[in-house]
Image (tube, rainbow, N blue to C red):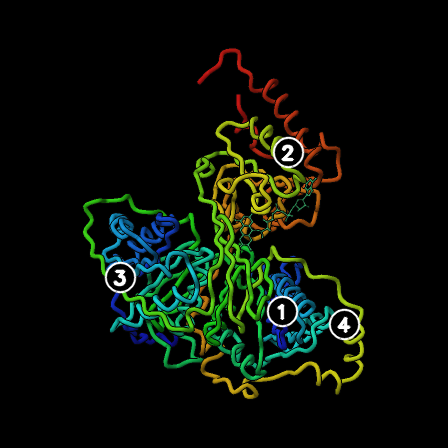
């Protein structure tokens, strides 16, 4: 603080509401929405405000009620056939109209850092000329003392800022980003990180319908085909060890080798990069990364995976990352803990061989103990 | 099917610090931009390729646009070497510390200033910001339809049909022109520099007057942007604090150059992996 003076407290007008922009697909709420309600509940109680969720879609039926059981005090619903699948312009219109309808703006608006959330959030933020932080991994509420004199009218103590915390510079830094000068303060949040609340059927909430009032210019883009594979669960999120294969396997059969390596471990699962899912070598539920699953096993063995940012965000929190790649320049070697430069078709069989002899030599007790 | 033809294709590119080079990376992990090695944002290479593909198949002139310090000329020249026709550099001290909203404001003013366009291509995100926000924020300012995470596209009957990567699959979106596209890094790699482009750049570097015809350096005044909406003042967000994340980044132990028996036994010796083996 400058010259020991007390900064004036500045309260940016808001109705203290925390709003989660929900996502649904094929009659199900996307997990990230429930996670955001979990995180939003905490922010709302720190602010002393309410938590709400706005859900767009078609034939939503029981979904709003489900959002209430996961913590929403109010669910705003827009139900219309044009909203069945996410589309930028219609969704943008409904959300912009909805947020414009408040006398005092909501305090915080959160979206999932999904391909929809990251498409929509910047449009909303630019429309209202308000701050937006991308791909957050932590959120909090706290005060901020702004002393930078470049903009004298902004100097002051802001009591209830959204702390939007995110990795930056290739995940080597964590940045705390603030924008308390205008509400709503917005953030997109990485899926798979926040914890949903336990559903409570007794939690009371209100369901309110909001208008869908599209303009001719909202029809300038049309969704002509949707190819979504519904994710069935594979126990990736609970495994201690994940052996993941990428395009470096060279052929679908390569996954046989991945399975063989996996069979050496206890509580193990198989994972994959998007590229091999896209070409059909392995189904989508095995995909790890931004548009797949976020995992955090104790050991992650990446075989023939280059380490693209979208893969990395889904696995970089793993305890021990071992990468096998024949290209010493592959980006995965920037964030793996151990890397073997070599052909996976030579390295993996050798690993299996040594693991097996290890098991025989060292781990074989005379009497099996549990 | 009528043959589509385009006139003006814009591609937005950015110069970023090269994070693989050690120069200019402070011990606390932040970047000293003056000292850091500079490079074209790797994600923008896909946007450049998409713009050049479009020109090849549907005609038109490709204009590369960047915002940054004067050194950003380097990436405009690089774009020209790849076959881009001309470039604009928005360079102004009042842009310092712009967040995504302020950046998108300034860039949309550049676009309006240049005038007519059919398609705008942006990289998916930058390696120094990772936000993926500027593209859609420009689309909002210009009231355009957009396709983000675009991996493939074609133009038919004056509409763009774009493939968008989403969770668990794809979507195909048909958009009216003009429109904005952010290009995924699963799009085609940028091809080699063209001989013509390289010659052109050599020529421009020898002839200042010619250079100024193809590459225009402009300021906020040129484009009529409000300084209050740019830079730190125009940015609704600030980075209040950064902390180094110690567990990841730059600490990989590389095992190479030995027999595979040796490499594998090194891994087994130097990690706790054995604890997870099946008994
Ligand atoms: C919006 C969007 C979302 C995405 N979401 C995801 C996601 O959720 N998950 C994801 O994984 N990707 C995702 N991607 C794709 C991502 O950008 C990459 O394209 C993908 O991760 C690359 O997969 P890969 O590493 O298997 O293939 P490549 O990048 O082709 O890498 C193959 C690697 O194998 C190595 N190699 C080749 N042969 C051998 C050998 N014999 N032995 C050892 N190494 C070898 C090569 O050196 C190379 O590094 C997404 C992309 C977009 C645009």
On whether disc 4 and disc 3 are found on a single subunit, the reply is no
Give the foreground label among 2 and 3.
2
Measured in 3D between alpha carbons, the distance from the residue under mark 4 to the one under mark 3, in whole angstroms, is 57 Å
Q: Residue at x 58, y 21 (%)?
A: A359
| Mark 4 CB lies closer than 8 A to ligand 1 | no
Which dot marks residue A253? 2
Q: CA distance from mark 2 to mark 3?
A: 54 Å
Same-chain check, marks 4 and 1: yes
* Protein chain holding label 1: B
| Residue A353 at x, y percent in the picture | 66, 25
Q: Which residue is drawn at the image coordinates 36% and 73% (left, top)?
A: A181
User: What residue is disc 4 on?
Assistant: B197
Q: From this viewpoint, which residue is outermost toward the top?
A: A366
Q: Earlier in the sequence, mark 4 or mark 1?
A: 1
- State if disc 2 and disc 1 touch (CB < 8 Å): no
In the image shown, does A93 or A203 lie closer to the viewer? A93
Say which quarter of the image contains residue A216.
Answer: bottom left
Which residue is denoted by mark 3 in the rendering? A47
Distance between the alpha carbons at the discs numbered 4 and 1: 19 Å
Residue at image x 78%, y 71%? B198
- Residue A191 shown left or right of residue B115 in the figure: left
Q: CA distance from mark 4 to mark 2?
A: 44 Å
Secondary structure of residue under mark 1: strand
Q: Nearer the viewer, mark 4 or mark 1?
A: 4
Chain of the residue displaying label 2: A
* Res. A215 image quadrant: bottom left
Q: Which subunit holds the residue at mark 3? A: A
Q: CA distance from mark 1 to mark 2?
A: 41 Å
At label 2, counting other C-alpha atoms closer than 10 Å, the crowd grade (few under 14, some 14-19, many 20 or more) is: few
């Amino acid at each position: 603080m400058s010259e020991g003076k007390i900064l004036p407290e500045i309260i940016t007008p808001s109705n203290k509401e925390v709003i989660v922009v929900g996502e649904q697909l094929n009659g199900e709420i996307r997990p990230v929405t429930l996670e955001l309600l979990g995180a939003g509940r905490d922010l709302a109680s720190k602010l002393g405000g309410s938590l709400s969720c706005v859900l767009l879609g078609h034939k939503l039926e029981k979904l709003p009620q489900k959002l209430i059981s996961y913590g929403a005090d109010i669910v705003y619903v827009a139900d219309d056939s044009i909203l069945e699948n996410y589309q930028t312009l219609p969704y943008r219109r409904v959300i912009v109209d909805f947020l414009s309808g408040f006398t005092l703006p909501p305090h915080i608006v959160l979206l999932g850092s999904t391909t929809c959330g990251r498409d929509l959030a910047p449009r909303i933020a630019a429309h209202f000329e308000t701050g937006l932080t991308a791909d957050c991994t932590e959120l909090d509420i706290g005060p901020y003392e702004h002393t930078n004199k470049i903009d004298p009218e902004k100097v002051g103590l802001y009591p209830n800022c959204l702390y939007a915390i995110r990795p930056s510079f290739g995940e080597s830094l964590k940045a705390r980003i603030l924008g308390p000068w205008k509400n709503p303060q917005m953030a997109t949040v990485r899926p798979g990180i926040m914890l949903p609340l336990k559903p409570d059927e007794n939690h009371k909430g209100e369901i309110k319908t909001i208008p869908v009032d599209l303009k001719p210019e909202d029809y300038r883009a049309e969704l002509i085909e949707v190819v979504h594979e519904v994710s069935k669960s594979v126990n990736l999120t609970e495994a201690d060890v994940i052996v993941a294969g990428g395009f470096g396997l060279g052929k679908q059969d390569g996954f046989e080798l991945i399975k063989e390596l996996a069979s050496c471990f206890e509580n193990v699962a198989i994972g994959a990069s998007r590229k091999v899912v896209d070409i059909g070598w392995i189904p989508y539920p095995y995909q790890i990364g931004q548009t797949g699953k976020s995992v955090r096993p104790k050991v992650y063995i990446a075989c023939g995976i280059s380490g693209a940012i979208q893969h990395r965000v889904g696995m970089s929190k793993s305890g021990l990352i071992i990468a096998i790649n024949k290209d010493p320049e592959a980006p995965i070697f920037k964030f793996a803990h151990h890397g073997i430069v070599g052909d996976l078709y030579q390295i993996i069989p050798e690993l299996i061989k040594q693991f097996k002899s290890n098991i025989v030599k060292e781990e074989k007790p005379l009497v099996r103990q549990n | 099917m009528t043959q589509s033809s385009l006139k003006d294709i814009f591609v937005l590119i950015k110069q970023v610090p090269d994070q693989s080079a050690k120069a200019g990376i402070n011990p606390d992990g932040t970047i000293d931009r003056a000292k850091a090695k500079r490079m074209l944002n790797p994600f923008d290479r896909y946007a450049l390729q998409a713009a050049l593909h479009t020109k090849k198949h549907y005609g038109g002139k490709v204009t590369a646009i960047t915002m940054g310090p004067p050194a950003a000329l380097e990436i405009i020249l690089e774009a020209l070497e790849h076959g881009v026709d001309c470039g604009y550099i928005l360079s102004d001290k009042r842009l310092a510390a712009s967040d995504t909203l302020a950046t998108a404001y300034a860039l949309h003013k550049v676009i309006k200033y240049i005038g007519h366009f059919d398609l705008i291509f942006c990289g998916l995100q930058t390696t120094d910001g990772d936000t993926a926000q500027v593209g859609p924020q420009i689309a909002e300012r210009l009231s355009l339809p957009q396709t983000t995470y675009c991996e493939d596209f074609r133009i038919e009957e004056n509409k763009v049909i774009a493939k968008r990567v989403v969770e668990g699959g794809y979507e195909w979106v048909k958009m009216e022109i003009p429109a904005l596209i952010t290009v995924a890094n699963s799009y085609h790699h940028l091809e080699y520099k063209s001989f013509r482009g390289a010659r052109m750049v050599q020529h421009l570097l020898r002839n200042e007057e010619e250079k100024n015809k193809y590459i225009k350096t402009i300021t906020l005044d040129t484009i009529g942007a409000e300084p209050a909406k740019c830079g730190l003042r125009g940015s609704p967000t600030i980075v209040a604090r950064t902390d180094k994340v110690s567990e990841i980044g730059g600490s990989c132990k590389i095992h190479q150059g030995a027999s595979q028996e040796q490499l594998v036994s090194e891994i087994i010796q130097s990690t706790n992996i054995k604890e997870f083996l099946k008994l």
